[in-house]
Image (tube, rainbow, N blue to C red):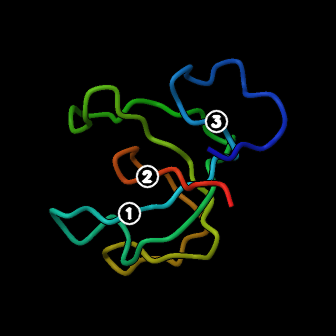
């Protein structure tokens, strides 16, 4: 994982990717979402990761704030968004270059 320098916020979950981690937002094989295409972004420190709410998450799954490298439209065509809350199942850590 790539991580920016600096302290991780004290309330950051111990098992969560740290702010600055480079990730790829992927499409779900079961439906056409959550975004129209796959793309890269960075875990942001503006929101502490939290469990997926409403019983729809996988065991221990977190929601992350991700800043997108380029603005993206969601699966409904709304946007473009420069970032958003993304469930952990739709994120894959990118190898550092």
Q: How far across and how far down the image is residue 7, in percent?
A: 81, 28
**In the rendered view of the protein, which quadrant contains the C terminus?**
bottom right
Q: Mark 2–mark 1 contact, CB under 8 Å?
A: yes
* Residue name at image x 32 percent, y 66 percent: 27
40 or 33, which lies in front? 40
How packed mark 2 is, by other alpha carbons closer than 10 Å (few <14, some 14-19, many 20 or more), is: many
Q: Mark 3–mark 2 contact, CB under 8 Å?
A: no
* Residue name at image x 84 percent, y 34 percent: 6
Lower position in the chain sequence, tag 3 or tag 2: 3
Question: On the picture, is 4 further left or further right than 74?
Answer: right
**In the rendered view of the protein, which quadrant contains the N terminus?**
top right
Q: Mark 3–mark 1 contact, CB under 8 Å?
A: no
Height in image: 17 above or below 83? above
How packed mark 1 is, by other alpha carbons closer than 10 Å (few <14, some 14-19, many 20 or more), is: some
Question: On the picture, is 36 further left or further right than 19?
Answer: left
Q: Could you tell me how far apart the alpha carbons at marks 2 and 1 are, in whole angstroms?
A: 6 Å
Quadrant of residue 31 in the image? bottom left
Q: Could you tell me how far apart the alpha carbons at marks 3 and 2 are, in whole angstroms?
A: 13 Å
Quadrant of residue 63 in the image? top left
* Residue name at image x 61 percent, y 48 percent: 43
Q: Could you tell me how far apart the alpha carbons at marks 3 and 1 are, in whole angstroms?
A: 19 Å
Q: Secondary structure at mark 2?
A: strand
Q: How far across and how far down the image is residue 74, in percent?
A: 39, 72
The residue at which mark 2 appears reads as 91
Lower position in the chain sequence, tag 2 or tag 1: 1
The residue at which mark 3 appears reads as 18
Q: Secondary structure at mark 1?
A: loop
Height in image: 51 above or below 94? above
Lower position in the chain sequence, tag 3 or tag 1: 3
The residue at which mark 1 appears reads as 26
Q: How far across and how far down the image is residue 19, in percent?
A: 68, 40
């Amino acid at each position: 994982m790539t991580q920016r320098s600096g302290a991780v916020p004290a309330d950051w979950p111990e098992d969560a990717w740290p702010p600055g981690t480079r990730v790829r937002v992927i499409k779900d094989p079961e439906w056409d979402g959550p975004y129209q295409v796959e793309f890269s972004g960075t875990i942001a420190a503006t929101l502490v990761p939290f469990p997926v709410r409403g019983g729809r998450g996988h065991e221990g799954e977190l929601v992350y704030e991700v800043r997108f490298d380029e603005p993206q439209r969601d699966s409904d065509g709304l946007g473009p968004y420069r970032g958003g809350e993304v469930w952990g199942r739709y994120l894959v850590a990118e190898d550092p270059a």
